[in-house]
Image: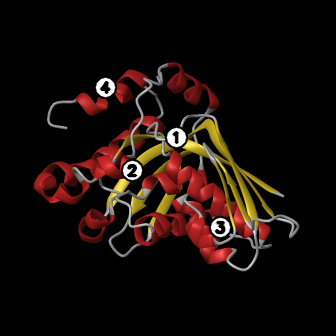
Amino acid sequence: MIITRTPFRISFFGGGTDYPEWISKHGGAVLGCGINKYCYISLRYLPPFFSHRYRVVYSITETCSKVSQIRHPVVKAVCSKYFHNRGVEVHHDGDLPARSGMGSSSSFAVGLLHASHALLGQMTSRLSLAKEAIDLEQNTLQETVGSQDQVLASYGNLNYIRFAPSGEILVRPLTLQSDRVGELLSHCMLFFTGTVRTSSVIAKSYALNLATKKNYFLKLPEMVSEACALLTAKKFDVRAFGGFCMKPGK
């Protein structure tokens, strides 16, 4: 049995510039991090003694004899690619509810792909894992999602991510001293309001019309760079970082 633990994420700056329609023309940049809340996936080959070949456990339990009968879209796509000839059992647990806005869908995709490669005896890099999850969600499933969630789920920690129009993804981890991380975290609060939504549905209301806000989105990569500079400055001012997005003209 393979068990993976994949972090959820929060995004500080640059969200919106990670959608493929925008990246292909302008590129994009994001500053975000993984958090200490996780998606857990267990995956194993299912012994041939059961009447079903696939068992998928999440908020519901599915038992199927064919891949085409699997209802969970990510599990169905991954099994179609890697386990169409051999039955598996997938079990999901999460530290946060699904559709809570923390990149849970992408964490699930990354975690399941990671587990799949491991079960097949394959080693995969963090970047390859992120790109495969992006391709799965954007192309195979045709969902309106960006690319930052998959990268942050694959890499964890705090990262500056650059998306080039060529399709190249550059990830630069920001290594901060422990006292600076502690100061930043001591000024951060995260609340669960009880509201859930499907991000790909919400994204359709704006992701396909980014060109109408072109001037705004063209400024975001510059903001990301300035935010990184604030975080890594010799003297750290946490209030300056927190108030940066409220500066006039930003």
Residue sitting at x 74%, y 71%: 123
Which callout, 1 or 3, points at the residue further toward the start of the chain? 1
Write down the quadrant of residue 48 in the picture: bottom right
At label 4, the amino acid type is Gly
Q: Residues within 10 Å of mark 2 (few under 14, many from 20)?
A: many
SS at mark 4 in the image = helix
Distance from the alpha carbon under mark 4 to that under mark 3: 36 Å
**Residue at the spot of label 2:** 30
**Residue at the spot of label 1:** 98
Distance from the alpha carbon under mark 4 to that under mark 2: 17 Å
Residue sitting at x 63%, y 34%: 95
Between 234 and 46, the one nearer to me in the picture: 46
At label 3, the amino acid type is Ser
Residue 71 visible in the displayed image: yes
Q: Which mark is residue 243?
A: 4
At label 1, the amino acid type is Ala
**Residue at the spot of label 3:** 125
Which callout, 4 or 1, points at the residue further toward the start of the chain? 1
Residue sitting at x 41%, y 71%: 139
Which callout, 4 or 3, points at the residue further toward the start of the chain? 3
SS at mark 3 in the image = loop
Which callout, 4 or 2, points at the residue further toward the start of the chain? 2
Q: Residues within 10 Å of mark 1 (few under 14, many from 20)?
A: some
